Image (tube, grey):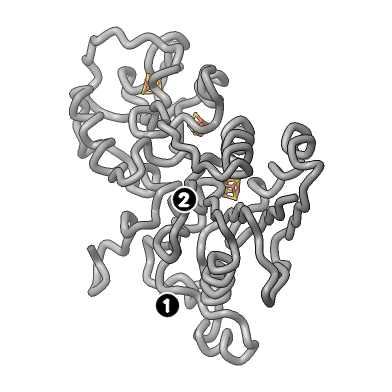
Amino acid sequence: MAKLLFYALGACGGCELLALEQELVSLLEDHEVYVYPLLSSPPGGSFSFDIALISGAVLNQEHQEFLRDLRARSRFLVALGTCATHGGIPALVNERRPEERFEEVYPTSFRQEVLKEGLPLPLPYVKALDELVKVDVALPGCPPDISYVLKTTQDLLKGTIPKFRWPSVCETCPYERTGKRNVRRLHRLLAGRDHPLKERCFLEQGILCLGPVTALTCVQGEPPLCLAAHMPCRGCGGPVRAKANPMLDMLNALVGNRIDWRSWPDRKLILAFAGAHGHLRPLKGPQCR
Ligand code: SF4
Ligand code: SF4
Ligand code: SF4
């Protein structure tokens, strides 16, 4: 009987809900499963796990300590969801220096307040799990499709580490790419006079779609979820390659579509889910990369 842990660091709790999926519950009915919701603490001491599925990004020193401790006590560690693999939404704050983030909201110095209240100190930058510990399986997706979680769990229970190759969102997109690249600038969806054509690639119509640089982790072998609802991909599946630079890759995709890169919107839109690994940093000042 294996011991599995579902635990969340800085997260929305969405990935943790995967532990309640019926197929996973059935697969694990003969095993010991520990689910610790947000803001709770995992069992400490010498208690060890065969598989730890950890969602969320690393925001503060407490997260960092928990993560290192759980790594030491787990045979396999899975980074579950885009927050854990690439920083996700929490890493959007990396665009600002830590003192700016807090002093804009709190009347006194956040550091003083944190020390006074005994709260965990925030890290200078929000991090993905693999920036601090060894990750055996990275499962991006917001949340990942349950089929990937099932395959990972089945393989790890047999002692095998699964390998995934994510196609890009474009690969199963049903929209037509005509090759006619006569739009030179990006514009906001619904901001123009004309509603975008339903059957035509968004990028070819000058609407930002992160399909070329995003891993298809929201579904398996089906039209991507947002495209099926006639919305462009926002990149929640994480970068299509593990070590990719989504900003650079998207720049290439724009140039390939003959769109003036200077018309692209706020860089946060490109890195909204992938701000860890040093991709999103303050533009000015000594920490600028
Ligand atoms: S990856 Fe998405 S669903 Fe999972 S914790 Fe992060 S924001 Fe929530
Ligand atoms: S850029 Fe977007 S709309 Fe165009 S093919 Fe890729 S996913 Fe589909
Ligand atoms: S289409 Fe893109 S933004 Fe939408 S769910 Fe899939 S990966 Fe996420």
Which numbered circle lies on residue 285? none
Q: Position of residue 41 (x, y in %)?
A: 71, 70
User: What residue does disc 1 label?
Assistant: 99
- Give above or below for 94 relative to 161: below
Residue positioned 42% across, 77% down in the render: 99
Q: How many marks?
A: 2
Q: Which residue is mark 2?
A: 85
Report the quarter where the C terminus lies.
bottom left
Q: Secondary structure under badge 2?
A: helix
Percent position of residue 186, x then y: 30, 30
Q: Is residue 46 left or right of residue 209?
A: right
Local packing at callout 1 (Cα closer than 10 Å; few below 14, some 14-19, many 20+) is few
Q: Is residue 54 left or right of residue 242?
A: right
Please name whichever residue, 125 or 78, is drawn nearer the observer in this view of the structure.
Answer: 78
Q: Pick whichever of labels 1 and 2 is earlier in the sequence.
A: 2
Amino acid under disc 1:
Glu
Q: Neighbour class for label 2 at 10 Å: few (<14), some, many (≥20)?
A: many
Quadrant housing residue 119: bottom right
Question: Residue flagged by tag 2: what amino acid is it?
Answer: Thr
In the foreground, 278 or 199: 278
The secondary structure type at the circle numbered 1 is: helix
CB of mark 2 near ligand 1 (< 8 Å) = no
- Residue at point 54%, 46% (across, down): 81
- Compared with 25, 54 (above or below) is below
Residue 71 x/y as whole percent: 54, 65
- The foreground one among 17 and 231 is 17
